[in-house]
């Protein structure tokens, strides 16, 4: 989810809720303690130099049960961050404390912002010998015509 999409959703909401991949909601008294632009410059295992930029939201639970972050307040924090940090319309990455700091993607289901799982991946599979994954086909989806018949041209 990109930053403009988050801002558009915040303009429509009366309250903010974040839902973890396991279905649990982040407690109502969470704080967004940081909004930042993260720039990552790296070399993949194939030797290609890459650059990635994301907007980072850090969610934190405090023992402050009396306050709740309202959409207009988060929108103001985002707009200040855009101006001061020169943040463009980038993808959002969310940090949230679990057993360790978890990094999540972000989506929206019409009510809640959804923290989505992220996966590591090799960006240079063609250069480091990782075979391409073969597509799987269900036998029930194959054409029911015989593939090799005496009058066919397959043999």
Image (cartoon, rainbow, N blue to C red):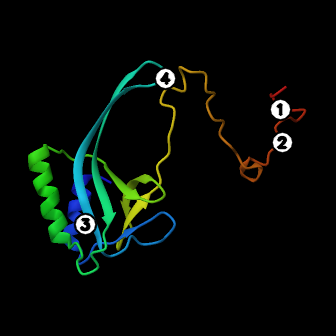
For label 1, the SS is loop
Q: Nearer the viewer, mark 2 or mark 4?
A: 4
Taking the image as shown, residue 108 lies to the left or right of residue 120, namely left
* Residue 146 disc label: 2
Q: Earlier in the sequence, mark 2 or mark 1?
A: 2
Marks 2 & 1, CB-CB < 8 Å contact = yes
Residue corresponding to mark 3: 9
Residue corresponding to mark 4: 45
Residue neighbourhood size for the residue with mark 4, other residues' Cα within 10 Å, grouped as few (<14), some (14–19), many (≥20)? few
Quadrant showing the C terminus:
top right
Q: Earlier in the sequence, mark 1 or mark 3?
A: 3
Q: Nearer the viewer, mark 3 or mark 2?
A: 3
Q: Which of marks 3 and 2 is nearer the N terminus?
A: 3
Give the distance between the C-alpha atoms of the residues marked 3 and 4, in whole angstroms. 38 Å
For label 3, the SS is helix
Q: Which residue lies furthest to the front in this view?
A: 63
Q: Residue furthest bottom?
A: 66
For label 4, the SS is loop
Q: Earlier in the sequence, mark 1 or mark 4?
A: 4
Q: Which of marks 2 and 1 is in front?
A: 2
For label 2, the SS is loop
Residue neighbourhood size for the residue with mark 1, other residues' Cα within 10 Å, grouped as few (<14), some (14–19), many (≥20)? few
């Amino acid at each position: 989810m990109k930053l403009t999409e988050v801002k558009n959703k915040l303009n429509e909401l009366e309250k903010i809720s974040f839902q973890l991949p396991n279905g649990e909601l982040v407690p109502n008294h969470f704080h967004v303690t940081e909004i930042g632009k993260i720039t990552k410059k790296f070399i993949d295992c194939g030797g290609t130099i890459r650059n990635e930029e994301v907007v980072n939201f850090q969610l934190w639970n405090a023992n402050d049960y009396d306050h709740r972050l309202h959409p207009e307040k988060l929108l103001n924090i985002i707009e200040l961050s855009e101006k001061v940090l020169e943040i463009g319309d980038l993808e959002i990455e969310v940090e949230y404390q679990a057993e360790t700091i978890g990094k999540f993607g972000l989506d929206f289901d019409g009510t809640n912002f959804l923290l989505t799982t992220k996966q590591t991946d090799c960006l240079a599979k063609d250069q480091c010998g990782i075979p391409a994954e073969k597509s799987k086909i269900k036998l029930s989806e194959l054409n029911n015509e015989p593939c090799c018949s005496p009058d066919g041209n397959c043999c």
